[in-house]
Image (cartoon, rainbow, N blue to C red):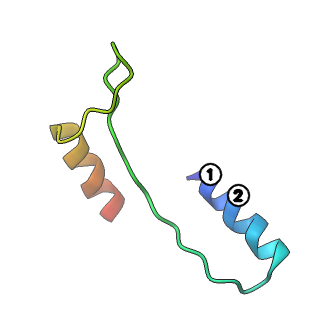
Amino acid sequence: VAEVLGGLVYVNLIKPGHPAIFGTWPFVSDLRTGAMSGGSGEQAVLMAACGQ
């Protein structure tokens, strides 16, 4: 979240009033391999939290 907000501030400093979108893409990583674990129960919880 902090990185996205920092980017939005930077864009607004360069061009005030420029439209921007704050979007999230939560994903769960397999701690053993580092690969994305799509479709897991944890991802459903993260998506619900982002919707809030």
Residue lying at the far top in this picture: please name it.
Answer: 32
For residue 26, above or below residue 15? above
- Name the spot of residue 23 as percent of width and height, x first: 46, 64
Residue matched to label 1: 2
Query: Could you tell me which secondary element the residue under label 2 belongs to?
Result: helix
Q: Residue at x 70, y 57 (%)?
A: 6
- In this view of the protein, can residue 52 be seen by the observer? no
Q: Is residue 16 above or below residue 24?
A: below
The image quadrant where one finds the C terminus is bottom left
Closer-to-camera residue (40/52): 40
Q: Quadrant of residue 9?
A: bottom right
> What residue sits 22% from the left and 38% below the top?
42
Question: What residue do we see at 34% from left, 42% from top?
Answer: 27
Residue for badge 2? 6
Answer above or below: position of 22 versus 30. Answer: below
Number of other residues with Cα within 10 Å of mark 2, as a class: few under 14, some 14 to 19, many 20 or more: few
Location of residue 19 by image quarter: bottom right
Q: Name the spot of residue 37 as percent of width and height, x first.
A: 26, 32
- Circle number at residue 32: none
Tell me the kind of residue under disc 2: Gly
Using residue 37 as the reference point, say whether residue 14 is left or right of it: right
> Depth check: 10 or 50 in front?
10
Q: What residue occupies the far bottom of the structure in this picture?
A: 17
Give me the residue at 23% from left, 47% from top: 45
Crowd tier of the residue under label 1, counting other residues whose Cα lies within 10 Å: few below 14, some 14–19, many 20 or above: few
Q: Secondary structure at mark 1?
A: helix
**Residue 30: x %, y % from top left:** 31, 23
| Contact flag, marks 1 and 2 (Cβ < 8 Å) | yes
Front position in the image: 16 or 36: 36
Q: Amino acid at mark 1?
A: Ala
Give how far apart the Cα atoms at labels 1 and 2 are.
6 Å
